[in-house]
Amino acid sequence: MPGPKDLDPSTSPRALLGAELRHAREKAGLTQEELGRPLFVSGSFIGQLEAGTRRMQPEYAGQIDEILETNGFFARNCKASNKSRYPDHFAEAAEAEAVATTIKEYAPLLIPGLLQTEAYARAVFRAYQPTATESVIDELVEARLDRAHLLDDPTTPLLWAVFDEAVLRRRVGGPEVMAEALRHVASLARRHRIIVQVLPFTAGGHAAMGGALKLMSFDDAPPLAYLQGSGAGQLEDDPATVSRHALAYDLVGASALSPESSLALIESVAEDYGHEDDQP
């Protein structure tokens, strides 16, 4: 019997690959847990592959072909499904973010990517790569701004961000860039598109001092946590691990200023930057 038709990589290849995986698994009469067992992964991981919130890695693709007798289909199409315009350490998280229904993010140093203006994003990437060509920086900025189109929908995903006060005080790009960037965040909050809080310096030590944290939930897959460092990132799907990071986020939010007070502080700092730029 012929195997499934190869996917067209131009039409959401990872989502199509996930749908084919579900079809092949169900045809074989296996549950997600039963398919995951010989791969040494959880049933929830298989569910995330099927939902398109996780990448299928080549080593899994080959084993899945053997277990489900799919004639090398998943190995052939795995490469196409893994193509991304984002750095390797962030690509899987960005793709999961695109289908999330809720995103909760703690930002310790920088305005989160989904909320950055073009000038702010350009200043960030230039700081990261001081010797890169303008074309490289342009590509990075374009990819980041494209991600922000997730917020074009008036309600989904729900985005709840907690900024460390350092995000407001770090002069990325100078006062003019900071004023514009913070006003953009404030505008989104004023329009009730996002929820934003600020964790003030006076809050002292807190549960998320290890670094940036992003939590994502989905309609048809278990939640994920993404931990990001300098040039590195880790996507977590273990339920106990995700729950631990969710608790850390909740504790940070409990120590932060209220959304109303946070918005007032963001607008005040933006105004200060604006006045500073007006001075001769």
Image (cartoon, rainbow, N blue to C red):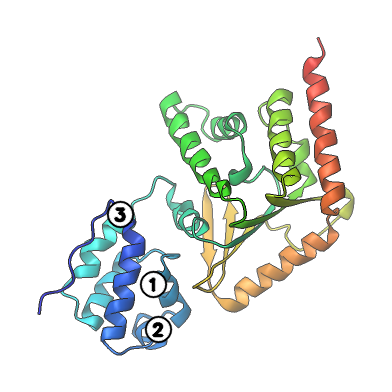
Q: Which residue is mark 3?
A: 11
Cα–Cα gap, marks 3 and 2 = 25 Å
Q: Earlier in the sequence, mark 3 or mark 2?
A: 3
Residue located 27% across and 79% down the image: 24
Q: Nearer the viewer, mark 3 or mark 1?
A: 3
How many numbered marks appear?
3
Residue 20 in the image: x percent, y percent? Answer: 29, 71
| Circle 1: residue type | Glu
Q: Are marks 2 and 1 in contact (CB under 8 Å)?
A: yes
Identify the image quadrant of residue 169.
top right
- On screen, residue 124 above or below 108: above
Quadrant of the rendering where the N terminus is positioned: bottom left
Residue located 85% across and 35% down the image: 268
Q: Earlier in the sequence, mark 2 or mark 1?
A: 2
Cα–Cα gap, marks 3 and 1 = 16 Å
| Circle 2: residue type | Gln
Q: Which residue is mark 2?
A: 32
Between residue 164 and residue 16, name the one nearer to us.
16
Residue 57 in the image: x percent, y percent? Answer: 34, 65
- On screen, residue 114 above or below 221: above
Q: Residues within 10 Å of mark 3 (few under 14, many from 20)?
A: few
Q: Which residue is mark 1?
A: 50
Secondary structure category for the residue under label 2: helix
Residue located 79% across and 26% down the image: 273
- On screen, residue 67 above or below 150: below
Secondary structure category for the residue under label 3: loop
Between residue 8 and residue 228, name the one nearer to us.
8
| Circle 3: residue type | Thr
Name the side, left or right, on which 235 lies relative to 278. left
